[in-house]
């Protein structure tokens, strides 16, 4: 039952009409009590006087700021369609983990991951489902991906071979250490790292690029192992929490890690990837040598942080 709201006007009227002795007794109680487990007790008699005093909760500045950060992060998640957790090994290329998958395959896999169902039970049972909860069949998956029958059959075989998906009697299950939605992260993450991959933005990117050049979009997935958890900067020490100690990864080094022979080709591809007319990748350089540029990733696409630096990041992409 909800606690009734205080009638401050009525309390003021009663106070004005109270005798001096009654006022003295009331003031004594407000100054001589202790709170134990949310209950107020008279320090002299031990009497429970919770119904006779008003206990104002003490909220520190840090608590208020923390609550605001959490609210901002939740709003950001909702604005971008919610998220799935994408798992990877820090500084290990996605190609090394899934050697049989091509760059176009990685684009399709990232899109496919946004359709994993929310897990409320065992982590091994994250099924591919539409947003309305209907499970995605093998046939409808090919249609969803927009692939020809033959190409989809080959892609599907590679997913099975890499143990990314598992055909079960009641649906297509997605390996929870690849993409996952749910709360039981400690049960599945092992030595993997993970980040939020936002569903709306990834799907919009896929819709935009599957007609033109699906291969280009693969770089979004490929770059995950190198993105700093707090600042979304592509770097050599993704788990560093102090901004001044981040070792930014130069564009030419990133190109080599992603398998590009020429950093200019990578730069061109990354510049073409945009969402809502905003770049997915922001380049920072000294104006002299593009090879030494480093990259910041739009948090509307991926973001692993606790929200503390989110507003500062979002300003860069307006």
Image: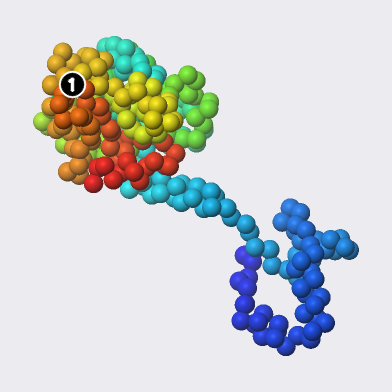
> Would you identify the image quadrant in which residue 15 lies?
bottom right
Expressed as whole percent of the image width and height from the top left, the position of residue 293 reads: 21, 26
Expressed as whole percent of the image width and height from the top left, the position of residue 124 reads: 47, 25
Q: Residue at x 46, y 51 (%)?
A: 68
Camera-side residue of 137 and 51: 51
- Name the residue carrying label 1: 291
According to the image, what is the colour scheme of the structure?
A: rainbow
Camera-side residue of 245 and 281: 245
Expressed as whole percent of the image width and height from the top left, the position of residue 2 reads: 62, 65
Q: Residue at x 15, y 26 (%)?
A: 288
State left or right for residue 48 relative to residue 279: right
Please tell me whether residue 60 is drawn above or below residue 128 in the rendered image. below
Q: Is residue 282 visible?
A: yes
In the orientation shown, which residue stands out farthest toward the left?
A: 212
> Would you identify the image quadrant in which residue 40 lies?
bottom right
Q: Residues within 10 Å of mark 1 (few under 14, many from 20)?
A: some
> Would you identify the image quadrant in which residue 104 lies?
top left
Expressed as whole percent of the image width and height from the top left, the position of residue 122 reads: 51, 28
């Amino acid at each position: 039952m909800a606690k009734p709201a205080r009638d401050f006007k009525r309390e003021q009227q009663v106070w004005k009409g109270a005798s001096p002795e009654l006022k003295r007794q009331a003031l004594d109680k407000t100054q001589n009590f202790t709170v134990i487990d949310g209950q107020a007790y008279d320090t002299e008699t031990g009497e429970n006087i919770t119904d006779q005093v008003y206990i104002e909760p003490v909220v520190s500045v840090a608590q208020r700021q923390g609550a605001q950060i959490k609210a901002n992060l939740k709003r950001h998640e909702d604005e971008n369609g919610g998220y799935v957790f994408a798992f990877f090994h820090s500084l290990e290329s996605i190609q090394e983990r899934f050697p049989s998958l091509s760059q176009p395959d990685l684009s399709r896999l990232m899109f496919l991951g946004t359709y994993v169902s929310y897990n409320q039970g065992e982590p091994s049972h994250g099924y591919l489902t539409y947003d309305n909860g209907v499970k995605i069949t093998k046939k409808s998956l090919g249609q969803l991906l927009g692939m020809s029958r033959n190409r989809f059959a080959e892609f599907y075989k590679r997913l099975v071979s890499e143990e990314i998906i598992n055909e079960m009697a009641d649906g297509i299950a997605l390996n929870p250490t690849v993409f996952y939605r749910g709360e039981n992260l400690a049960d599945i993450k092992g030595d993997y790292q993970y980040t939020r991959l936002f569903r709306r933005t990834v799907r919009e990117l896929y819709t935009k690029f599957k007609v033109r050049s699906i291969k280009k979009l693969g770089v979004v997935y490929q770059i995950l192992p190198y993105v700093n958890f707090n600042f979304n900067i592509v770097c050599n020490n993704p788990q560093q929490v102090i901004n001044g100690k981040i070792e930014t990864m130069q564009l030419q080094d990133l190109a080599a890690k992603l398998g590009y022979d020429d950093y200019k080709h990578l730069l061109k591809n990354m510049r073409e990837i945009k969402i809502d007319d905003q770049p997915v990748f922001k380049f920072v350089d000294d104006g002299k040598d593009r090879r030494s540029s480093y990259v910041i990733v739009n948090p509307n696409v991926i973001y692993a942080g606790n929200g503390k630096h989110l507003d500062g990041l979002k300003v860069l992409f307006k």
